[in-house]
């Protein structure tokens, strides 16, 4: 059975490869929605359109969403992904343009059209999904699954000592989404850091010579260097892409647990921290499947399949 996805992006390199992985695996991408995050909002839109042109999928629609969090201020992270989100290079689509329809309306309409079948891949702050939910709460029952790249399980963050970027940017939206009743699987930052593309694999990819492998090396070089130097990671991290692989194939999950998870949305030291009630102290119904371990071999298999596409 064909799977139907909306992919929500703050389009940097890992968002682009996630979009490609969905398409490579036969998913029907019903929309790419754009939200505030990694880099300038306009460039996020341009990157998504440019990426679709690269794989000649001009039929896929890009919907502009929110360009700011619900309540809080945030900052983009050009130091991590480069000014262009794929390094410092600034790209533009040749002819594709974003839709006039806004992401919030597109999400509500698509949830209706594919009721019970639509899956939402949130590899970005959760503002668009929270807004769509506030507009029409019935999407909770219509969206079959929400896959979230975000949060931490051990309290080891990347934007603050304890918070992961996507959740930190809009903790109010994340709190709404986590407490709404969506069927959520969460892939945390301090889990995915254990599965980077290491030096041997990076060199192997460099030798592949496919168009996709060259594209990959080009768009990830900045992020790889930054992460290895500043985040103590032994290679290129793939938060979005691992989450996408998890969404596509349950075998990518090696270990997960269902817990009640809430989000700290105060303006405080722990803003954006995901609070996991691992002892059921609050006696609340578990709302999130939390991924703790990844089957790295399976993920790499999917990555190489993507890099061998063309
Ligand atoms: Ca992202």
Image (cartoon, grey):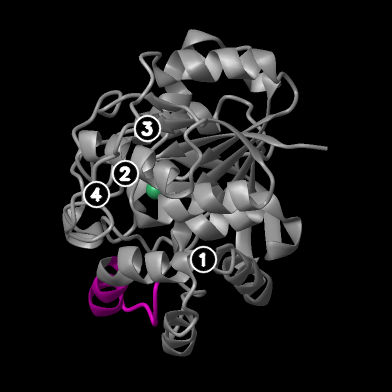
Camera-side residue of 93 and 274: 93
What's the CA distance linking mark 2 and mark 4? Answer: 33 Å
Give the residue pinned by disc 3.
34
Give above or below for 224 relative to 69. Answer: below
Q: Which element type, helix, strand or loop, lies under badge 4?
A: loop
Give the residue pinned by disc 1.
191
What's the CA distance linking mark 1 and mark 3? Answer: 25 Å
Camera-side residue of 235 and 159: 235
Comes first in the chain, label 1 or label 3: 3
Give the residue pinned by disc 2.
47
Classify mark 2 as within 8 Å of ligand 1 or not, answering yes or no: no
Q: Position of residue 25 (x, y in %)?
A: 67, 51
Residues rendered magenta in the picture = 223-236
Q: Residues within 10 Å of mark 4 (few under 14, many from 20)?
A: few
Comes first in the chain, label 4 or label 3: 3
What's the CA distance linking mark 4 and mark 3? Answer: 28 Å
What's the CA distance linking mark 2 and mark 3? Answer: 10 Å
Judge depth for marks 2 and 4 and give the one in front: 2
Residue located at (45% from left, 47% from top): 274
Give the residue pinned by disc 4.
269
Q: Is residue 250 left or right of residue 170?
A: right
Camera-side residue of 62 and 152: 62
Residue located at (26% from left, 27% from top): 67
Judge depth for marks 2 and 3 and give the one in front: 2
Q: Which residue is the extreme one toward the bottom?
A: 200
What's the CA distance linking mark 1 and mark 4? Answer: 22 Å
**Position of the C terminus by quadrant:** bottom right
Q: Position of residue 213 (x, y in %)?
A: 46, 70
Q: Which element type, helix, strand or loop, lies under badge 3?
A: strand
């Amino acid at each position: 059975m064909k799977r139907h996805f909306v992919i929500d992006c703050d389009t940097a390199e890992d968002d682009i490869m996630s979009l490609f992985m969905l398409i490579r695996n036969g998913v029907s991408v019903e929309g790419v929605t754009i939200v505030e995050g990694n880099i300038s909002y306009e460039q996020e839109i341009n990157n998504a359109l440019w990426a679709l042109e690269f794989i000649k999928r001009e039929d896929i629609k890009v919907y502009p969403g929110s360009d700011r969090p619900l309540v809080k201020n945030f900052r983009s992270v050009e130091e991590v992904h480069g000014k262009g989100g794929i390094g410092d290079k600034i790209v533009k689509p040749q002819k594709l343009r974003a839709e006039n329809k806004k992401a919030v309306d597109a999400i509500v309409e698509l949830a209706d059209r594919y009721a019970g079948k639509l899956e939402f891949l949130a590899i970005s702050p959760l503002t668009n999904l929270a807004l769509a939910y506030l507009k029409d709460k019935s999407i909770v029952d219509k969206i079959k699954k929400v896959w979230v790249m975000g949060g931490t399980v051990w309290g080891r963050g990347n934007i603050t000592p304890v918070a992961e970027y996507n959740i930190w940017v809009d903790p109010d939206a994340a709190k709404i989404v986590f407490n709404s009743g969506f069927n959520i699987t969460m892939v945390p930052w301090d889990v995915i850091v254990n599965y980077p593309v290491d030096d041997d694999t990076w060199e192997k990819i460099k030798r592949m010579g496919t168009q996709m492998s060259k594209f990959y090396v080009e768009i990830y070089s900045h992020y790889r260097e930054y992460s290895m130097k500043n985040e103590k990671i032994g290679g290129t991290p793939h938060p979005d892409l691992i989450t996408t692989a998890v969404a596509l194939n349950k075998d990518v999950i090696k270990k997960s647990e269902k817990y009640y998870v809430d989000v700290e949305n105060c303006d405080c030291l722990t803003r954006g921290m995901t609070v996991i009630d691992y002892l059921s102290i609050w006696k609340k119904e578990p709302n999130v499947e939390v991924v703790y371990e990844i089957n790295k071999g399976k993920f790499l298999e999917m990555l190489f399949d993507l890099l061998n596409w063309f």
